[in-house]
Amino acid sequence: MPKNTVYETDIEFLSILDEDAQFDESLGIEDGEPILSDEQVVYLYEQMWIGRQLDEIAFKLQRSGRMGTYPQNKGQEANAAGSGFAMKKGTDWVVPCYRENIAMNLHGLPYHYILLHWMGDERGNQIPEGVLCTPISVPIGTHMLHAAGIAWSFKLRGEKDRCAITYFGDGATSEGDFHGAMNFASTLSVPVVFYCQNNQWAISVPREQQMASPTVAQKAIAYEMPRIMVDGNDIFAVYKATRDARKYCVENQTPYFIEGVTYRLGDHTTADDARRYRSEEELQQWMAKDPLIRTRKYLESRDAWNDERQLELETHARKVVDEIVNEANSIAEPTTSEIFDSMFAEIDDDLRIQRDTMRTSSIGQNPEQAGLKAQTQNA
Amino acid sequence: MPKNTVYETDIEFLSILDEDAQFDESLGIEDGEPILSDEQVVYLYEQMWIGRQLDEIAFKLQRSGRMGTYPQNKGQEANAAGSGFAMKKGTDWVVPCYRENIAMNLHGLPYHYILLHWMGDERGNQIPEGVLCTPISVPIGTHMLHAAGIAWSFKLRGEKDRCAITYFGDGATSEGDFHGAMNFASTLSVPVVFYCQNNQWAISVPREQQMASPTVAQKAIAYEMPRIMVDGNDIFAVYKATRDARKYCVENQTPYFIEGVTYRLGDHTTADDARRYRSEEELQQWMAKDPLIRTRKYLESRDAWNDERQLELETHARKVVDEIVNEANSIAEPTTSEIFDSMFAEIDDDLRIQRDTMRTSSIGQNPEQAGLKAQTQNA
Amino acid sequence: MANLTLVQAINLALVQEMEADESVVLLGEDVGLNGGVFRVTEGLAQRFGDHRVQNTPLDESGILGAAVGLAIAGMKPVPEIQFEGFLGPAYDQIVNHAARFRNRTRGAITIPMTLRVPVGGGIHAPELHSDSPEAIYTHSPGLKIVMPCTPYDAKGLLISAIRDPDPVIFFEPKRVYRAYREEVPEDEYTIPIGQAKVVSEGDDLTVVTWGASVFQCLEALDGLPEDVSVELIDLRTIDPIDTDTIAASVEKTGRCVVVHEAPMTAGLGAEISARVQERCFLHLQAPVQRVTGFDTIMPYYKLELEYMPDANRIGKGIRECLAY
Amino acid sequence: MANLTLVQAINLALVQEMEADESVVLLGEDVGLNGGVFRVTEGLAQRFGDHRVQNTPLDESGILGAAVGLAIAGMKPVPEIQFEGFLGPAYDQIVNHAARFRNRTRGAITIPMTLRVPVGGGIHAPELHSDSPEAIYTHSPGLKIVMPCTPYDAKGLLISAIRDPDPVIFFEPKRVYRAYREEVPEDEYTIPIGQAKVVSEGDDLTVVTWGASVFQCLEALDGLPEDVSVELIDLRTIDPIDTDTIAASVEKTGRCVVVHEAPMTAGLGAEISARVQERCFLHLQAPVQRVTGFDTIMPYYKLELEYMPDANRIGKGIRECLAY
Ligand SMILES: Cc1ncc(C[n+]2csc(CCOP(=O)(O)OP(=O)(O)O)c2C)c(N)n1
Ligand SMILES: Cc1ncc(C[n+]2csc(CCOP(=O)(O)OP(=O)(O)O)c2C)c(N)n1
Ligand SMILES: [Mg+2]
Ligand SMILES: [Mg+2]
């Protein structure tokens, strides 16, 4: 069809530290310095290492029956670490899905909360005062709207240096609420960084069955939202994109979209067996792109890391993770009262009676109704 | 941020017969002939006229209490007429919203069905055998998925020359189900024409509050869906875009997106008063772009129309519309039995008793329960 | 005091709460300049500014999800869904998110939100504009559900709802919107959530209802013989149900009829029937009767009045229950 | 005959119906190569091709909306929603579209669809993976709701559901998926939708339940004194409810306990209680008792067994009802 062009656009891709640990100085150096100092990269490398260590332990806990289903973050750590680091702790809100343990931790959430969550304990969601994180979100896609609403509150209150970041997978972009969140954030013009961890799979569904588009980033065009694709296994690219996105959001009071191209090196969760649906070859290709390997190589190339420090880190990480597990395990078993106590600010009489008797049958709740005695109380 | 461009795209706009009735021959002539013959344009002009006449009568019926809320199609007729005409009657499915009366009628639905619908009668949805239309859809956005499913059935059955078209407004593109429909159609790769009647308003919400994007068409980019913007008040552009879209869909077994840029000249519905929220000026500007005026001018410029034919048409249209109204009014009042009879292929005993007694109270259903007699039956 | 319609009383409550508390914000389709399709928010955008009375995109899930976000971050959102039939797309955000946040975070995150929704039939509206889904949300733990039917109750309950620290669905029976006026104090006042109202006292039978059906029940009562004395209870709050008031009445009368517009099966009539027989088993002289909508979809308007319990059907239900 | 689990029996029914009828197609998240997260559709993509066992995008509303479209155009879609907690986003397409099409078109358009959904708690799953929303869909007119708990019933009911000309929700109690085996005939057979099953006969009290709770009730019955004789009814179909079977039993026993996992208020226990007292008022010797989930959100798994009615709680309910 012949026509006039009325709209043109494009998508750009950012990569700084590539899979061979080659560092692109034109992008990674600002004012003569790397955008992340060696100390910062060491710190983030350590965080990523600890995050992965926690994953392995969680996996073992699940296998030995001491934890429920658990989704590993393995292979995707640079996304959460680089972006979490770029956001302002205590000022910004983090609205995660379930593969951003490191970002939650960087923003102040002790790791044992995350274990508690997967151990089937709501106290894992009882985010401590001052930590600006929503809990891990199991239903896919629904939490991004919460991020839009949180960012809207900044605008309503005139809090001009705040921003929200929300994380989600490639699969999540299919949900209606993804569309809603992108549309609300862009029409209301509020500061949210939408961070998609495109790990190529949604359980067993590959990206091509999930979307017809070759990139996730182009979905942002529908909302006239500024956007970028980054190598999500590149801590520098992730950091820089998020830092700049945050700045853009705050200065322009608009949302921003980042697609982090990455890969889930593990199974979907401990309940999954990825060998059923994806090839060993593909896995091997991505193994080579592991963010931890290239970050270590970078540090080594700058003499900021060596085998000795690595050994130290490994010992340290084991200790840290052991403590986290101990912390989670040391929490007393929940009481049945907890089922009820937080249903409302003040629970009504019906709920109170259910709680106190642990019964719904009317006679169980009022033994005298049938001339019965207290033996019918909660045993 | 510095980066590599990895994706580029654009949106094009098609206009053939502009608001001054100037005809772009480079676009509107194919093989030496206009893409719509004069007879065809006359036919479509008449259909649009009758459609508008029906609108006016419906409005009056509503005002005099003989019809419920009614949404006028006024000003948007070229969208439904041009696109409906381009689809294959009896082969393709039409999945409308509520401003496509003309398209439904072109595909075989007698107009009195549409009146019955708005008169609060489900028989208006009892689409006759052989007419491939779903009924008018009141909830916004939900029907587009049905079009995707219908198109999928073509693919599953190997029916290669069939296509579905679905219509919706600019507001509808905000619903999650719009996103779902676009995503399902594009990932499943099925032949659906998505036709957005962008009439600039969703009740009182202007396009700028509905979406941040300057075009609706760019939403299709998110799904890598071929797309075009057309002047929706230009019967030639609408026809050509839809004809070509249909061809593309069938040949490539994919969906296609069309944004018809148009305007709602009336209130949102008879329950609305647009003066509360939009300017007289804006309305006047769009009055000048009325599809009927420019189509008539085009025909006159080709000596295919004159005042006499216009008078004839007006008389004819009044007669046709009167007959439609009579047809709708002549239908016997529905019986209460209709409330129940079509709930299931076979209704269960509980429903049967509710129907036969018109009661839900157990004694009302079984008068002997209380030693009562038949006086308790449906009075 | 002014003689107000339900629409006006709700508008007044919104004005007063928005003045009293900056964190109260309204959002929804057409709530801005247009004042909502029923004009309930008329004048508020002009008075409080567009940012506090926000027209949103046409996306109910978006409205609720954004409202949940606002609430997480300390605001008191008052979203409007245009008609109860369009709660469907927002169902997940209401039931699986708004309702769950407090308990799933053991109190760390709370959702002080009031969701306003016109509800019910009887105004000759199009498809999906006349439903009564209150039982659905009552079965979903974590929500309070209010449905006042008089201007006075509406104002007092809406103020309570907005101040409530938890999510409340505030259903507005649209059939009553402009059909009834009463004196409503200018001053602010609250009516506690969870308390039913005894509309008329009586000894022979208890009628329990809520929303627009209260008026149908009053009409039915008018048509009863002089010597029949019926106690009419307007629940006002549906969740939590004020079982004490109902049980006290049925213990006195021994008979109970529940009236509602929603379909019978798994409706609130069932819950009230179950509670009445659990609490008043030995007092009951007849089975609790349900006079409700049928187990069909709400018909288009030509048949809607045949579907909804009217004075005639309610009257029959009462008489039969008395005759048992 | 083979000794099959629930998962295997459902798989077998799917195979047989897909072989018998080309218009039967499966769709859902991970139903393809992976065979679904519970492996219910294992081997089907390999056997019938990807196009008839279609992995879809992660969009429940999309799955149901597309299924409705398939059905409109003459197919017999069998969508799967991965866990009942994710019905939320699909609620609108189920209740306001699939359920309404036949009646709103007076029979011109019909939706012969079977929606398969794993349901219920007890498997230590994450949040929103353990709910019991059957009452929600029962209150919504136009759907049939089935919840078998044995492999034999599941196969026969699934075949009936797929052949049914109207939308059926087929709930699969995930706690039973692999926990129980029984002989299931290789040949196809059907079990009519709408018929409850008397699992054990008895004279003193009737227990009505469905889904995984049937097994908890059996355990409770085991713990009762020898001289107590309980009639246990497995509804199998929840909508329409087989009131005749329940009423016949309660007329005999005079006592009834309803057991379900979902929250009590406005749950199906209420509906059954209401029906029992409407039908058996003069036979009832005690109020109908409800032993159900509490009116709270389903707890995370550490507390889920405290939430769900277990043999202990059910046994107490029975004994108290008997003592009334
Ligand atoms: C609403 C909803 N539907 C289905 C699921 C089941 N489910 C859990 S994770 C998942 C895939 C998510 O894929 P993606 O968004 O790409 O995130 P990833 O797991 O790859 O990080 C699915 C289908 C869910 N949790 N929520
Ligand atoms: C799900 C849903 N939400 C809200 C409404 C109320 N409503 C009816 S029409 C309308 C605006 C539709 O705007 P658009 O899609 O642009 O179509 P137009 O009326 O402009 O043709 C709204 C909000 C509805 N019918 N359905
Ligand atoms: Mg993924
Ligand atoms: Mg519009």
Image (cartoon, coloured by chain):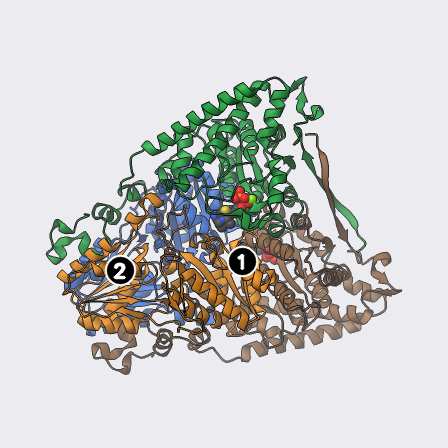
Chain colours: A green, B brown, C blue, D orange
Front-most of residues A286 and C305: A286
- Chain letter, disc 1 residue: D
Q: Nearer the viewer, residue C88 or C162?
A: C88
Q: Position of residue C319 (x, y in %)?
A: 24, 73
Mark 1 neighbour class, 10 Å CA radius: few under 14, some 14 to 19, many 20 or more: many
Q: Quadrant of ligand 2?
A: bottom right
Task: Measure the C-alpha gap from mark 2 to mark 1.
Answer: 35 Å
Label 2 environment density (alpha carbons within 10 Å; few <14, some 14–19, many ≥20): many
Q: Which residue, given by chain and number where applicable, does mark 2 sit on? A: D217
Expressed as whole percent of the image width and height from the top left, the position of residue C165 reads 35, 40
Quarter of image, res D62: bottom right
Q: Earlier in the sequence, mark 2 or mark 1?
A: 1
Comparing D170 with C239, the one in front is D170
**Which amino acid, by three-letter code, is at mark 1?**
Ile
Q: Is residue A165 above or below residue B272?
A: above
| Residue B83 location (% of width, % of height) | 71, 63
Mark 2 or 1, closer to the camera? 2
Which dot marks residue B129?
none
Q: Is residue D318 above or below residue A239?
A: below
Q: Position of residue C127 (x, y in %)?
A: 49, 64
Chain under disc 2: D
Nearer to me, B281 or B377: B377
Q: Is residue B245 left or right of residue B139?
A: right
**Residue occupying image coordinates x 15% and y 61%:** D225
Tell me the kind of residue under disc 2: Cys
B88 shown above or below C45: below
Question: Residue lying furthest right in this view?
Answer: B32
Q: Is residue B160 left or right of residue D94?
A: right
Residue that badge 1 annotates: D63
> Tag 1's secondary structure?
helix
Image-based side of D308 in relation to D226, left or right: right
Q: Quarter of the image containing the C terminus of chain B?
A: bottom left
